[in-house]
Image (cartoon, grey):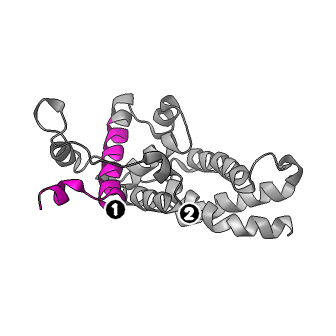
Amino acid sequence: MSIENQLAEHRSYLLRFARLQLRNDAWAEDAVSETLLAALSSPQSFANRSQLKTWLVGILKHKVVDALRQRSREVSYDGDAADGGEELDALVFGQGDHFASQPADWGNPEQDLSSRQFFLVLEACAEKLPAAMGRVFLMREWLELSSEEICKELKLTSTNLYVQLHRARLRLRECLELNWFGDTRTTAST
């Protein structure tokens, strides 16, 4: 199979990844196109040292970071990142900053992490995060940018960054408990 056909097979996955981070279809298309062009222009750098998909995602991560930096002034602030945080904290934490209820038993996380369906649910949950919160979470966890880089890029204080990351993780946890692990609190009471 030619390199062009192999690259075409991974395009939809790369596009989903870029859309999750950039939250803009046109920017995602541009990042994926630039990724595929970079791969086509220097296929010798691949040299089968990893899986093709892994290599392409590595290129795409750099293209997404470049796009975020290039377009950071074009992104409009949507105030929903701060909305609802207190209500979510109140649901999760009782008095004294302890969990109001124990987290659900997630079974065997290592086995679940290897499951393709788990990652599809995780991506769907990440897509449901408010845009600004999702962007911060993906920059930190998927693009592996340092906290300092994210704060500088998005003009956030470190406190605001950590609050947004905390809230994003709580929302992802809640979404995964409902859509993947099952909410044991509702089954325990029946």
Q: Residue at x 15, y 43 (%)?
A: 90
Please, what secondary structure does the residue beneath circle 1 have? helix
Image coordinates for residue 132, horizontal then vertical, percent: 40, 50
Image coordinates for residue 27, horizontal then vertical, percent: 59, 60
Q: Which residue is mark 2?
A: 16
Relative to 18, is 81 above or below?
Answer: above
Q: Nearer the viewer, residue 36 or 108?
A: 108
Please, what secondary structure does the residue beneath circle 2 have? helix
**Dot 2, crowdedness within 10 Å: few (<14), some or many (≥20)?**
some
Q: Which residue is mark 1?
A: 179
Q: Is residue 17 left or right of residue 3?
A: left
Q: Is residue 136 visible?
A: yes
Relative to 33, is 158 above or below?
Answer: above
Q: Which mark is residue 117?
A: none
User: What amino acid is at disc 2?
Assistant: Arg
Residue range highlighted in magenta? 163-190
Image coordinates for residue 28, horizontal then vertical, percent: 59, 61
Q: In terms of secondary structure, what is the magenta stretch mainly? A: helix
Is residue 129 magenta-colored?
A: no
Relative to 36, is 85 above or below?
Answer: above
User: What amino acid is at disc 1?
Assistant: Asn
Query: What is the number of callouts on the image?
Result: 2
**Residue reaching furthest to the right:** 44
Quarter of the figure with the N terminus: bottom right
Q: Nearer the viewer, residue 69 or 183?
A: 183
Q: Residue at x 42, y 48 (%)?
A: 108
- Which-is-in-front pick, marks 2 and 1? 1
Q: Nearer the viewer, residue 59 or 149?
A: 59
